[in-house]
Structures are given as C-alpha cells and as structure tokens.
Image (tube, rainbow, N blue to C red):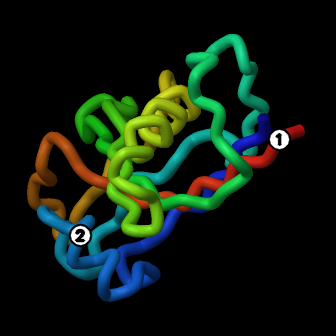
C-alpha cells in the first residue's frame, strides 16, 4: 500500500470541513507546523492491522503535533465523506503512516508563545501497490 500525503492550510479546506475540523486554530499569518520528510510512503501491510481492508481512497485527517518537540502525537479522522463507522480504520492507518514523524514547530510571526499542541491538516491518498 502506498500513502501519499498533501498538507493543507486552513484556507484550503471547504467551509464544511472548516466547521468540523477547526477548533483551536492559529491566527492568520502564523507559520504552521512543517512536516520533515517525504510525502509518499510505502506502508508495509504487516505494520497495520490485517482487518483494515481499506479501498483506494483519499481522506482528510487532522494531525496533532507536539509543538515543543516537533513529534507527531495522533491523527484524528473526521472526514465527512467517510462513514462514522469506518473512521476508526482510517484513523488507525493515518496513525501508522505518521508514527515517528517529525515536524518543524509552528510559530507566530511576532514571537508570542504557541500552544503546546497544534493541529495540522492533511489529505491522505491510499493506493494498493
């Protein structure tokens, strides 16, 4: 399985997506967390639970980033295009994709402190290889 991720700014989300996903957003002009690494990853089927039989699909996830360390904390999938009963499977996959990934911390241009945990939005496309 191949996972391709594309990181988004809040302005790239639809209004419906913004209403669902954005709770504690950084002010406009803030520098968002930046992924350090590649945006395409081969996922070993042994590293994810075998019952995650997921079709090729693109979905939206929110990544929670520890802004002090730059470490990925967890992924949350609330994509309205995915049935609520299926979201846990996509969330497990997103957590597998980003486990161990690092990010450059978010920051405000004026230097004021940023919250300890910040959100980052990503579209993930999965393809069977």
Q: Which residue is mark 1?
A: 128
Q: Residue at x 49, y 22 (%)?
A: 100
Residue 40: x and y in percent read: 74, 45
| Residue 1 placement, left or right of 86 | right
Tell which of 7 and 68 is nearer to you: 7
The spot of residue 102 in percent (x, y) is 48, 33
Number of marks drawn: 2
Inter-mark Cα distance, 2 to 1 = 29 Å
> Please, what secondary structure does the residue beneath circle 1 have?
loop
Q: Residue at x 70, y 47 (%)?
A: 55
Q: Quadrant of residue 83?
A: bottom left
Q: Which x, y percent locates residue 53?
A: 65, 32
| In the image, residue 111 above or below residue 44 | below
From this viewpoint, is residue 37 visible?
yes
**Furthest residue in direction top, as rendered:** 46
Location of residue 102 with respect to 108 vertically, above or below? above
Disc 2 element = helix
**Mark 2, residues whose alpha carbon is within 10 Å: few (<14), some, or many (≥20)?**
few
Residue occupying the point 58% across, 29% down: 52
Residue 20 numbered tag: 2
Quarter that holds the N terminus = top right
Find the residue positioned furthest to the right. Answer: 129
Placement of 109 over or under 106, stated as above or below? below
Circle 1 residues within 10 Å: few <14, some 14–19, many ≥20: few
Residue at image location 66% in from the left, 56% down from the top: 57
In this rendering, does residue 48 appear at all? no
């Amino acid at each position: 399985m191949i996972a391709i991720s594309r990181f988004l700014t809040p302005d790239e989300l639809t209004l419906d997506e913004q209403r669902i996903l954005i709770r504690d957003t950084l002010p406009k002009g803030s520098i968002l967390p930046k992924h350090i690494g590649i945006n395409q990853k081969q996922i070993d089927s042994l590293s994810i639970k075998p019952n995650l039989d997921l079709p090729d699909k693109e979905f939206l996830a929110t990544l929670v980033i520890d802004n002090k360390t730059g470490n990925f904390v967890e992924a949350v999938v609330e994509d309205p295009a995915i049935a609520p009963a299926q979201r846990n499977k996509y969330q497990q996959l997103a957590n597998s994709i980003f486990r161990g990934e690092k990010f450059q911390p978010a920051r405000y241009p004026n230097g004021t402190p940023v919250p300890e945990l910040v959100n980052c939005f990503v579209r993930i496309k999965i393809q069977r290889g």
